[in-house]
Amino acid sequence: MNKTQTMNRFLITAFVSFLTIMSCNNQLKKNMDLQNESTKTMEVEKIDMKLRKLLNLDTFSELFGGVWLPKEYVNEIIKTKSAYLSRNSIPEIAELAITKKNLKKDTLFVGSSINNHEGYGFNIWNSEVTSEGHFSNNIFDWDKGKKYLFEYNLSDKLISIVIKNGNGIVENQIDFVKVLDDKFISGYGGVGYEYIARKYSINGNYQILDSLKNELGIANFDPKTGKIENFEYGYYTIATDYIANPSFPSDHIILRLKPEEYSNLKYLCIINRNDSILLYETEEIVTDSTYNFGLTEIKYYLIDKNY
């Protein structure tokens, strides 16, 4: 083989090798591009999965619709059977009323109250900083020294408001539990407190006696509706707000002829005696230096027939 043939064979071999290398590089680039694309797709899917885990307000208002009370207060009134004795367990943010009716576009208004005394409400919404189990909110937005987090837990069906100070340290956490469906939400607050107080103080069947112990029959007290059957008064409420006015230091019942009637109501003090409930009239006791309330006569005896 002469030099010319050898050189030609070398050039051909070199060219084939170059084409092979270029082909391998192109394939490697394609593989890397496919891998990068796959990685990007996985990242997008992860982000999309996280977004899917975030409840939109429409779904949230359906799953969490209802009246919510502080868990600590509910546990306390179950133990004491007394709204009066449980009053100190009521936190500043006292109640949550969640209904789809209050959803406007991308914002849900949550009815609330301050100390179960003053009407209040705030908004929650999804935002860029919203994470799983959270909604942005404007709770007490005038308080610049604290931050309020609105959280929900799907598995435990719990709503929490976490309160942080200016340094980001958690000062308090209020856990709320659902006590009523959203159909019981009304234009005024406190329905959850009224229901839970009725449920654990006067609930079900009682034989009624008047002040002379004449039998008036067996009446039924429904804690959810506040309705009384087989009694001269048709509705009842248990007082839960002890901030407003002075009163005898005990639980109190408000008896009404109609649900929203305020003119012919009867306001009586509840005293428990063994298996009976005594409903007392009260009177103001005024001196030069004091203003107080005392018990006068028994208006009704309620004998428990729930057995």
Image (cartoon, rainbow, N blue to C red):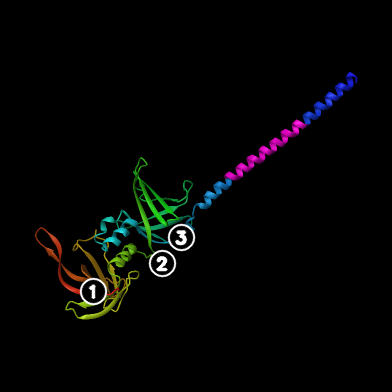
Q: Residue furthest top?
A: 3
> What is the C-alpha distance between the residues marked 2 and 3?
14 Å
Q: Is residue 52 visible?
A: yes
Question: Can you identify the residue that label 2 sits on?
Answer: 183
Label 1 and label 3: CA atoms lie apart by 39 Å
Work out whether residue 76 or residue 55 is closer to the camera in this orientation and state it: 76
Q: Point out the tag, 1 or 2, that comes first from the N-terminus.
A: 2
Give residue 290's position: percent from left, percent from top. Answer: 12, 59
Q: Is residue 106 magenta?
A: no
Cβ atoms at labels 1 and 3 below 8 Å apart: no
> Label 1 neighbourhood size at 10 Å, few (<14), some (14-19), many (20+)?
many
Q: Secondary structure at mark 2?
A: helix
Q: Which residue is mark 3?
A: 63
Q: Amino acid at mark 1?
A: Leu
Q: Residue at x 82, y 27 (%)?
A: 13
Q: Which residue is mark 1?
A: 302
Type of residue at label 3? Leu
Answer with mark 1 or mark 3, whichever residue precedes in sequence.
Answer: 3
Ranked by sequence position, the earlier of labels 2 and 3 is: 3
Q: Quadrant of residue 302?
A: bottom left
Specify start and end residues of the magenta stretch as a single range. Answer: 20-43
Q: Nearer the viewer, residue 268 or 23?
A: 23
Amino acid, disc 2 = Lys
Task: Determine whether 304 is above or below 249 in the image.
Answer: below
Q: Kindly give the residue lying farthest to the left in the view shown.
A: 288
Residue 94 visible in this rendered orientation of the protein: no
Q: Residue at x 89, y 20 (%)?
A: 4
